[in-house]
Structures are given as structure tokens and as C-alpha cells.
Image (cartoon, rainbow, N blue to C red):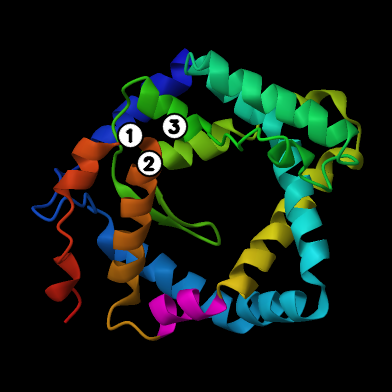
Amino acid sequence: MFAVGSVAACAASGPAGVQPDGINDPYETQNRRVHAFNRGLDRAIVRPAAIGYSSVLPDEIEDSVGNFARNLGEPSVVVNSLLQGDLQGAGISTVRFVTNSVLGIFGLFDVATDFRLPQHDTDFGETLFVWGVGEGAYLELPVLGPSTSRRATGMVVDLFTNPLSYVVDSPERYYGTVAAAASGLSRRGRFSDTVDSILYESADSYAQARLIWLQNRRFELGDTGAAADIDPFALDTEGF
């Protein structure tokens, strides 16, 4: 963990400083190429598959698949909460996992929320934030979409932070991955109008997606200092 944190700290510094609009995007040229690839992939495959998925399956089944995916991710949330020193968050996620696994039929139903146990979500990217690692440069990753160097490092580490991956045999260990992918399709289908307006109706879909993602991520982390640096009117002059 220390080695990963050190690497992330180096990556987070980036080759260039934060721009006046509060966005650190030294790799914009490469990022725009990846964005064009992701946009084409969405148009040709992801969007049609997502709309078809949401149209065919009842909402109840889509919700159950999403609940199942989130429940299998709870152990990773516990680990990251402990690494952040958040004992309350770790306790809530532990109780949620046990409750939904037993009473919610392996997590297909979110019984814990009915018991007023709120969902607590975190990842290793947030762990790095708590440890003081900087946000780093903005990145757009193939297929995965918007990210930062800190978030990308966290995504790699999160492949190994779920204890279930070490105790569950194949092919069962991949159920969570399949469910998470299906849940992603469900979200893409349900919020198709919003996503389409960003990707296909805005004057500069790259700048629009970058601004929205960074604002949302910084809000999730409670990174008020960084969020305050973003110029809310940045899109008025970008991409025109």
C-alpha cells in the first residue's frame, strides 16, 4: 500500500500545473483521442445495448442486479473505510453486507436500506485522497471514461481490495464483475437522455464531460478546496 501511495503521489504531481479554470489537463490531446474512441464505442455498441437492456428487463430485475453488484462490493468498501480510519463506515458496510446477504437473498434485495442502514460507498481513490495524495492530471481512459491519475491508481488497487476475490472460487468470483457491467448498462439506459445530451448535443462533449465528472468527483470526496477552483463558466470559452 505504501509503494502504491508513493507511485500515486509521483503521478499526481503531473507534468504541468493546474490551469486557471481549476482543471489540470496536460494530456488533453491524447485524452480527446480517447474520448472520440469512447464516444464512437458508445454510439455503436454501449448505447444500443443499454437501451435494449433497460427496455427488455423490468425495473425490478434491473434493481436486483444493481443491488447484487453493490452487495458484492461491500467488503472492498469495508477495507477502504478501515484504511481511511473510518470505523463507522466500515461497521455500516459490514452490517449492510451481512444483512443483505442473509435477508436480502445474496444481496438481490436491499433490505439494509429498509432497516435505515444508509449505503456507504468509497474506493481506494478516496483512500489516497484521505492520505493526502493529490488529484493529479485529468485522464480519459478507454472504455472506463473520465478519471484522474489518483482515481486511476485507486481503480487498479481496488482490483485487489475485495476479500471475496481471495475466498471465492471460479467462476463464482466473476459474478460481481458481470453484475457490475450489467448495472452499468442499466444506468446508461435509464439516464440515456442526460448522457446523450452531453455526448451528442453539447458543442464540446469532451470539455462538458470533463467538467461535470470533476465537479461530481470532488463533491463526493468533500474536496471543497479543489471544487472551488473550478470555474463554473469554463464551458463558455472552451471548445468554440
Q: Earlier in the sequence, mark 1 or mark 3?
A: 1
As measured in the structure, the alpha-carbon distance from the residue carrying label 1 to the one carrying label 3 is 16 Å
Examine the residues drawn in magenta and state their main secondary structure.
Answer: helix
Q: Secondary structure at mark 1?
A: helix
As measured in the structure, the alpha-carbon distance from the residue carrying label 1 to the one carrying label 2 is 6 Å
Q: Earlier in the sequence, mark 3 or mark 2?
A: 3
What is the three-letter code of the residue carrying label 1? Ala
| Percent of width and height locating residue 32 | 34, 68
Name the residue carrying label 3.
Answer: 126
Q: Tell me the quarter of the picture where residue 140 sits.
A: bottom left
Callout 3 crowding tier (Cα within 10 Å): few <14, some 14–19, many ≥20: many
The residue at the point 91 percent across, 42 percent down is 171
| Percent of width and height locating residue 232 | 18, 61
As measured in the structure, the alpha-carbon distance from the residue carrying label 3 to the one carrying label 2 is 12 Å
Q: Earlier in the sequence, mark 1 or mark 2?
A: 1
The residue at the point 65 percent across, 29 percent down is 76
Q: Is residue 194 magenta?
A: yes
Q: Is residue 71 above or below residue 86?
A: below
Look at the image and give the residue range highlighted in magenta: 192-200
| Percent of width and height locating residue 157 | 56, 31
